Amino acid sequence: MSVRSETCPVCRSAIRPWRVKTTGDQAFAIDRCGTCGYAFVNPRPGLDVLTRHYARLGHGREATDARSVLERERTFPNSTVDAARMLATIGALAGGGVGGRFLDVGCGYGFYAARARAAGFEVIALDLAENERGIAEAIGGVTPLACSFEAFECAPGSIRVVLMSHVLEHAFDVQAWIAKAHRILAEDGLLAVALPNFGSLFRLVMQEREPYVCPPDHLNFFDPGSLGRLLAGHGFAVEAVQWVSRLPLTAFEKRLPALKPVLPLVGAASWACLRLIDGLRLGATISVYARKARP
């Protein structure tokens, strides 16, 4: 059963139709808030439908085993780079001290779990997809729980860090997710959220054709402002925001094979352009770090 919202789920303001995105033979209406800018699939599939969807498919439909995942990462370093960056930022915000329980929500292939373990955290990982849990165990050195964030249970205030890397855009109820993160985090605990930037230059140019606008996989579309508003509403204070854009050279090679002899030059030029876009705060993805405020 689908669920429809009449007001913005983030700030309860009025919403208006934004676009209709067709995926396969399905058309998904996307509404947008005129106040905070949050956009979302409306109506959205029910929680039971989404749970079955991710348990069956996960987030990486092409990878079959740890070897193929690692080979792809060697060809185009992506998750390893992001994991190193985000764990370094978390460590810095924690005052250089690490340790305690680290909850990796939707752990995927385990790159973040591996980096968190190496940093000295006690990692708890969650993922609904059986294939991804197996790969995460091989790569991350953890045994993920076959559990949604909604169903996960732990004592209030028992988690030092909650990581949601490219998972909040999939959530059925973003208010419930952030409220739960606040409840389970220890005092001064950190919430780190990475997701596509709805305010990116790429989305502004391509609108609903932008690759991250991809229902039913992605249901929620945030920019730093709308995400910051959601976090503040649950007692979080945003301490850092990073904009990150990355493009593999294979993207040029596949679309413009004539460029193959000069790919290194193309790569250097694209890297410079992407860094400029990130510097202008228009990058493709954002990483937001927020601290549970003292009562």
Image (cartoon, helix red, strand yellow):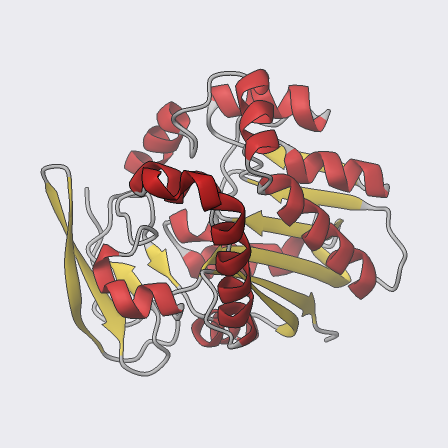
The residue that appears at 53% across and 39% down in the rendered structure is 106
Quadrant in the rendering for residue 38:
bottom left
**In this rendering, position of residue 123 left or right of residue 30:** right
Q: Is residue 109 visible?
A: no
Total of numbered circles in the picture? 0
Residue lying furthest front in this view? 261
Vertically, is 264 above or below 221?
A: above
Q: Is residue 182 visible?
A: yes
| Residue 83: % across, % down | 67, 45
| Residue 105: % across, % down | 57, 42
The residue that appears at 48% across and 58% down in the rendered structure is 270
| Residue 116: % across, % down | 76, 41
Classify the position of the N terminus by image quarter. top left
Q: Nearer the viewer, residue 169 or 78?
A: 78
Q: Nearer the viewer, residue 65 or 238?
A: 65
Quadrant in the rendering for residue 207:
bottom left
Q: Nearer the viewer, residue 54 or 116?
A: 116
